[in-house]
Amino acid sequence: MRRAPGGVATVLLLLVAVLASPAPSATAVEAGPAARPAVVEARTIGHSVRGRPIRAWRLGEPGMRRVVLISTMHGNEPHTRRILETLRDGRAVRGIDLWVIPTHNPDGLARGTRRNARGVDLNRNFPYRWADLDGSYESGPRPASEPETRAVMRFLREVDPRRVISFHQPLNGVDTDTKDRAFARRLARALRLPRTSLDCGGLCHGTMTMWFNHRMAGSALTVEYGAHPSRHRMVVEAPRQVLDVLGAHRTSRG
């Protein structure tokens, strides 16, 4: 039988190439310093019902006190994600270990709806004081039934932040009836928002902040901007105010 010339060599070269290729990682850095100097790590922490990625970006200095910022849990509250995107896309951050999740509910954002693609309000789906709610606050068939909920739960358990700030609209205030009321008051002053008690009209069941405050050592609170905050406020004022109250700052250069 005649051997195909170079056949063995070709197979060996292909095998070497496959073995040398890096294995895929859930913690892959997606943009280098030249593109996003603030980003030190990027992850896809999960996927939505429709398969859209839920992404988290790490900024600042690992080893410092850790904070997580989350936005767009409701897809019809799109403006505050600009705060987190501005932090991600700006100059390098110092003085904090900061994670940002600009879009928790990518399917809802794409559809312009409060709920996810299965019609579930993610902020009623967390497994603490969950209740069977219907309508705009549809809580799902069971606690943590939604992939978006489970993705954020896994991520928060893993990174174990000292603080979580969840950005919403349109109630215009900082919830000071929370685990760390002193910090909530400082945050309200820094963001120039009124202090308030967000009781959800008696429908605060299964919220992310309630779950985190009950299950984790750190503290979580909700920030609500108005229905139509100006672009200047979201991309210029608020990112600076957030860093200031967290004791962090940007570098003078990228």
Image (tube, rainbow, N blue to C red):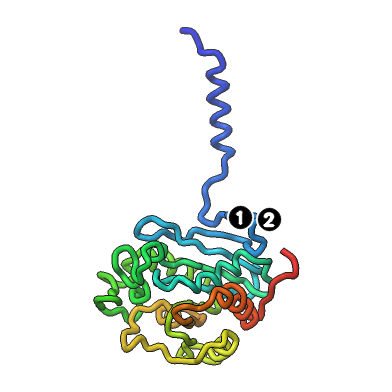
Residue at image position (58%, 32%) is 16
Q: Along the line of sight, which residue is nearer the eye, 29 or 116?
A: 116
Q: Position of residue 64 (x, y in %)?
A: 65, 73
Q: Position of residue 168 (x, y in %)?
A: 45, 78
Image quadrant assignment for residue 77:
bottom left
For mark 2, give the secondary structure. loop
Image quadrant assignment for residue 201:
bottom left
Residue 239 vs 190, above or below: the answer is above
For mark 1, give the secondary structure. loop
Task: Tell me the tag on residue 34.
Answer: 2
**Label 1 belongs to which residue?**
31
Q: Position of residue 227 (x, y in %)?
A: 44, 79
**Which amino acid, by three-letter code, is at mark 2?**
Ala
Taking the view exactly as shown, the residue that stands out farthest to the right is 252
**Which amino acid, by three-letter code, is at mark 1?**
Ala
Q: Position of residue 187 (x, y in %)?
A: 56, 86
Q: Indicate left or right for 42 with 130 as reference.
A: right
Neighbour tally class for label 2: few under 14, some 14-19, many 20 plus, Cα within 10 Å: few
The quadrant the C terminus occupies is bottom right
Residue at image position (55%, 78%) is 162
